[in-house]
Every structure is written in C-alpha cells, then in structure tokens.
Amino acid sequence: EGLDLALHMLADLKQVQSHFRPQIVAVVGLLGGKPYAAALEPLVDDRTAITQMMINNRVVGIQARDIALAWLIHLTDQDHEAYGMPQAKAQFKALAQQRLAHGNYHGFGFADDAKREAALKKWREYVAAHPLPEVPKRPKRELEIDFGVAAAPRAVAAKAAVAKGGDVKAADE
C-alpha cells in the first residue's frame, strides 16, 4: 500500500508539499525497486528546491531532480561518482548496511548548476541508450488523500473536533 500511495502522489505532485518529495522518491525506490525506476524519471526535470546545506565549506543546493537522479543511478546499478555525486554513493552504501526507513538525501545535491547539468546530461545519454522498462501495472485502488491534512495529525484532530461542534483547543486535550 505504501508504494501505491507514493505512485499516486507522484502522479499529482502539485498537490504535494515539496518537503515530502524526497520521502516519496525513497518509498518508490525502496518498495518498488528497479521495476519502478521509470516512475521517477519525470522528476529529473523537477527544479523544486528541497533544502540547502554546507558540505566542505560550500553551499550545496538540493533539488527534487537531484534526489530523483540519485535514486535512478542507484536503481540502474550505476556509479554515483561518475555523475559527480560521491556523497550519494556513501548514502546508498549506508542504506544497504542499515536499511534506514528512507535514507538520507542530504548528500544528493550539487555545489553548482554546471555540475548538476553535466550529471543530468549524462543521465539523459544513459537512458537514451538504455531505456527504462515500463512501470508495472498495479491494481487500481481508490485513494482518498488530502495531501495538506493527511500529513498533519493535529489538523485532522482539529477538523474532527470542529465537525463535532467543538473547537480546535479541544482537539489538543
């Protein structure tokens, strides 16, 4: 069911807050694996900023496409270092050893756009020569999701309290 939810969310990313995108990509990678790599491929064009951090005294911007690219490299058994993503290689090695819930995407960014564009160019060349297989068909499920509320348990409780004639404060008790 987690894979179904992640695929459903990927189909309508405009409804998904940006900070959920790394987890969605990780769920597809972890639960779907290589057969579902093609579901992540459209995200290589997603320039949504996820975070910034300092690595070796340099600001590294992490975009949704960086995270998707790191997972695609992993799922297609390529070397992250060849794409200029040595920290991603280390993160996937740690993920294989510890099987964390979703991995750590903080090493998936690029220090500058030139390196990012070079990696994306390399990916596009790879996928042109090695097309990804079609995503396997999944049974159709009805998923009712309110992306803004489902992620916030307090908001769900508050909504229920108000619907019963109470107030938001009552939901905290």
Image (spheres, rainbow, N blue to C red):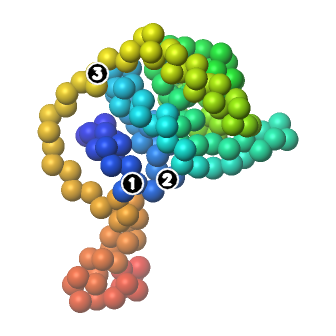
Residue drawn at point x = 23 percent, y = 82 percent: 163
Marks 1/2 in contact by CB < 8 Å: the verdict is no
Q: Residue furthest right?
A: 57
Place of residue 43 in the rendered image (x, y in percent of width and height, measured from the top left)? 45, 37
Q: How many angstroms separate mark 1 from mark 2 (CA)?
A: 9 Å
**Viewport quadrant of the N terminus:** top left
Q: Earlier in the sequence, mark 3 or mark 2?
A: 2
Crowd tier of the residue under label 1, counting other residues whose Cα lies within 10 Å: few below 14, some 14–19, many 20 or above: few
Along the line of sight, the residue nearer the viewer: 73 or 156:
73
Q: Residue type at mark 2?
A: Ser
Residue 134 is marked as: 3
Mark 1 residue element = helix
In this figure, which residue is indicated by the disc labeled 1? 14
Residue drawn at point x = 60 percent, y = 15 percent: 79
Q: Residue type at mark 3?
A: Glu
Q: Residue type at mark 1?
A: Lys
In this figure, which residue is indicated by the disc labeled 2? 18
